[in-house]
Amino acid sequence: MTLGPDAGLRFARGIQAGRWIFASGVLAADFRDGGIAADVLHSRSPLSGKPRHLRESARVFDHLEQVLAAGGSSLARVVRTDQYFTTWAAVSHYHAERVRRFRPLVPPTTSVLMPALLLKDADLDAQFIAITPAFDATLEAVYPAGLHVPSTSGFAPVVRAGDFVFIAGFMAAHQPGDLGGIAPQAKVPDGHLWKGTRIKLEAEYAMKEKIAVALDAAGSSIDSMVKAQVYLRDMHDLPAFNEVWERWFPDPRKRPAVSYIPTSTPGFAIEDARLEINAIGLVDGASTRRRNIEAGFHTGIDGQPAAVLAGDLLLCSALLAADADGPLPGCLPDPRQPYFGSTIDAQVDHVVDRAIALCSAAGTSLANMARLQLFMTDLSELDAAWRAFQRRLPGVDLPISAVQVPGPLPVPGCTLMADLWVYAP
């Protein structure tokens, strides 16, 4: 599929990988003429008809249903959704359309705010994971007793599909419907400067009261987590967050793959929240095996596994062109002449080299790429990044989504980070 009439860039609207279907970077796009579809924008009469964000959401779901049908699946077999919005004003309209389309079961979901998306007028970018009929298991929604979930979103907090457990994104919120905001025990007491560290308090609460409870209710546990995405409104909170993370995962051999992703400020449904975590696990004692994968490089974050192989999915920690000493050669501009040249080619080359090494160690191939989320501090670099990926992977329609995030990334100086999933038959 070509993106627009003149872009010259090819991407996969969806990927069927064995018993899985991935739809990444689903936008209300016009695939023939480019940009957001004109009947979504109503640019000449924007206040006529249904709300613009409801039209945008409906078009996103239309595109999703096309992808699922092409893969022999349906909305009833979606196990996880992730959404990026540029404005909070779009979220409620999306939720209304999502409930209408998915009723009766809205799968686990994560929604965060980001500065910019791939297309100029887009306020919504969505990712979906579904299973095909070849996945010999029914979907089981799990509603753990005492687990508070948002009151208006209407999603199941946990879905189990065979040996896999999908956990929605959770903040350190409390009270039914999460209407109490961030829990008091996850905050520094009012009027105090140093009675705890806010990010550590939120992380501990989210892990103890949300993620661990959700996993346990589905027959899983912290030791069986295989992948997490941790969204942070301030990446400078990462070192303190990792103090908590390592207490929950004291054995490096059992740590999940993890991506740390910056958001807008505010970035979450609760305005003063500092983080949101989603997770994937395996049921305890599963026949599906997990194995941490290393390929001889440092990810840029101490103690982080490079990837986890969970059954037929290779789940990578976020790939950056960095090691323990920071950005790799060629990935920083020359401070004497910063406006000459681009570091994107070098960053993509390092990321692809690492992805190939991980695939080789896991017994698969990067040709089996199923999902490629790019988080970039400047989307004006996307064209060069995309072409660099195509240069390294000629003939491959890339399952890309691209989101602009505020800097810094987890390794300052890097401007591109890839969250990569690969099918491992």
Image (tube, rainbow, N blue to C red):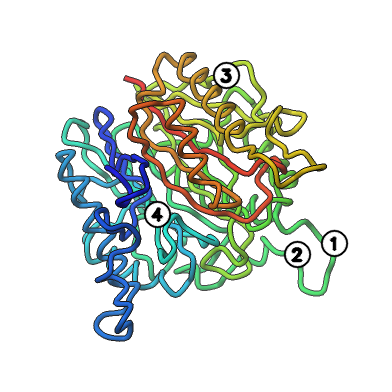
Residue sitting at x 61%, y 31%? 346
Decide: few, some or many residues near mark 4? Use Cα within 10 Å; few <14, some 14-19, many ≥20: many
Residue 294 is tagged as 3
Whichever of callouts 1 and 4 sits on the residue coming sooner in the sequence is: 4
Q: Are marks 3 and 2 in contact (CB under 8 Å)?
A: no
Residue sitting at x 41%, y 32%? 282
Whichever of callouts 2 and 4 sits on the residue coming sooner in the sequence is: 4
- What is the secondary structure assignment of the residue under circle 2? loop
- What is the secondary structure assignment of the residue under circle 3? loop
Residue 109 is tagged as 4
Residue sitting at x 51%, y 20%? 358
Whichever of callouts 1 and 2 sits on the residue coming sooner in the sequence is: 2
* Pick the front one: 193 or 231: 231
Against 308, is 192 above or below? below
Q: Quadrant of the N terminus?
A: top left
Q: Nearer the viewer, mark 3 or mark 4?
A: 3
Residue sitting at x 74%, y 44%? 239
Mark-to-mark CA distance, 1 and 3: 39 Å
Mark-to-mark CA distance, 1 and 4: 34 Å
Whichever of callouts 3 and 4 sits on the residue coming sooner in the sequence is: 4
**Place of residue 19 in the rendered image (x, y in percent of width and height, measured from the top left):** 24, 31
Q: Which three-letter amino acid code belongs to the residue tagged 3?
A: Glu
Whichever of callouts 3 and 2 sits on the residue coming sooner in the sequence is: 2
Q: Nearer the viewer, mark 2 or mark 4?
A: 4
Q: Which three-letter amino acid code belongs to the residue tagged 2?
A: Val
Residue 71 is tagged as none
